[in-house]
Image (cartoon, rainbow, N blue to C red):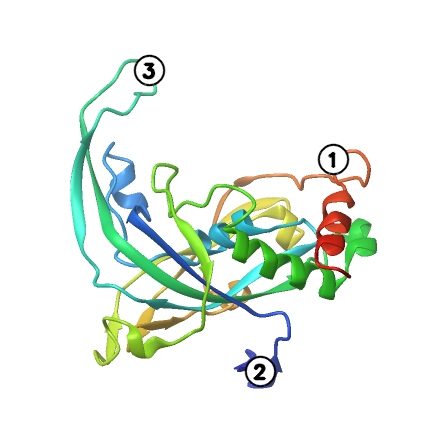
Amino acid sequence: MTIFSKRGEKMQYSNQVTLKVSGRRALFCDPLTKMGGEKFSYPIPTYQALKGVLESVYWKPTFIWVVDRVCIMKKIQTEAQSVRPIEYNGGNTLAMYTYLSDVEYVIQAHFEWNENRKDLVCDRNEHKHFLISKRMIEKGGRRDVFLGTRECQAYVEPCEFKNSESYYANSGEISFGMMIHGINYPDETGRDELEVRLWEPVMKDGVIEFIRPDQCKIVRHLRKSNMCSFSVGVNFSLCDELYDLEAEGL
């Protein structure tokens, strides 16, 4: 697949993966409703939520997952459920959460080296990480996969990107207004700040093409934050990767 950079240059990603994620429900919470104690889901997944799916499948601080596009396979529909969340001051309260029901998405993404991790240059082996990523997709992920919130368990499997099978294959363009794109963490930006990115997604025939995080024009500061530290042999190991490569016969 050929992808265009922000300069209009053609870019070819040899480490691109495609996977299908599905679940009984999803909750990509709109922060405007969360402050009132009740949660209401966005109609489509956010960039950050899909990135979280990929990181649950396989992730190392050496690289950053970049979501290229997603295909909405099933009809967007919601369901409400009464819950009793714990209050900040103790005790329980009654709230109404609105979930997306019976969801299925096809994600296409690739990974890039985290240039802020000069201390992990020794782990920059594209072939190794690509093969492990494919293997973890086939196995359903290294960690539990969920869609938005922890109670929304999801399942992952490899697939091909075909938007012709989408429920919205012939629906033209659908705009969803201003939404959260994702979070800027110090580990990925090199700045000691936690920021939130906003954008206006448009779905074309069931497919949403994501802009890169550095292309988001609306960025808001949240708070000061520090970069996490990783040290090989202390809280960062290469043993799992060596084991996976041996399992692949490499």
Q: Residue at x 60, y 39 (%)?
A: 225
- The answer to whether residue 128 is above or below residue 163 is above
Left or right: where 155 falls relative to 171: right
Residue 156 appears at what percent x and percent y? 44, 54
Disc number at residue 68?
A: none
Amino acid type of disc 2? Answer: Arg
Cα separation, mark 2 vs mark 3, equals 50 Å
Cα separation, mark 2 vs mark 1, equals 38 Å
Q: Are marks 2 and 1 in contact (CB under 8 Å)?
A: no
Which comes before the other along the chain, label 3 or label 1?
A: 3
For the question of whether residue 113 can be seen, the reply is: no
Which comes before the other along the chain, label 2 or label 3?
A: 2
- The answer to whether residue 165 is above or below residue 197 is below
- The answer to whether residue 189 is above or below residue 230 is below
Amino acid type of disc 3? Answer: Asn
Q: Residue at x 18, y 56 (%)?
A: 77
Amino acid type of disc 1? Answer: Asn
SS label for mark 1: loop
Residue 71 appears at what percent x and percent y? 36, 69
Q: Tell which of 113 and 249 is nearer to you.
A: 249
Query: Residue 159 sits in which quadrant?
Result: bottom left
SS label for mark 3: loop
Q: Tell which of 242 and 84 is nearer to you.
A: 242
- Quickly name the residue at label 2: 7
Residue 22 appears at what percent x and percent y? 35, 54
Disc number at residue 235?
A: 1
Q: Tell which of 166 and 11 is nearer to you.
A: 166
Label 1 Cα neighbours within 10 Å, binned few <14 / some 14-19 / many ≥20: few
- Quickly name the residue at label 3: 89
Q: Residue at x 64, y 75 (%)?
A: 14
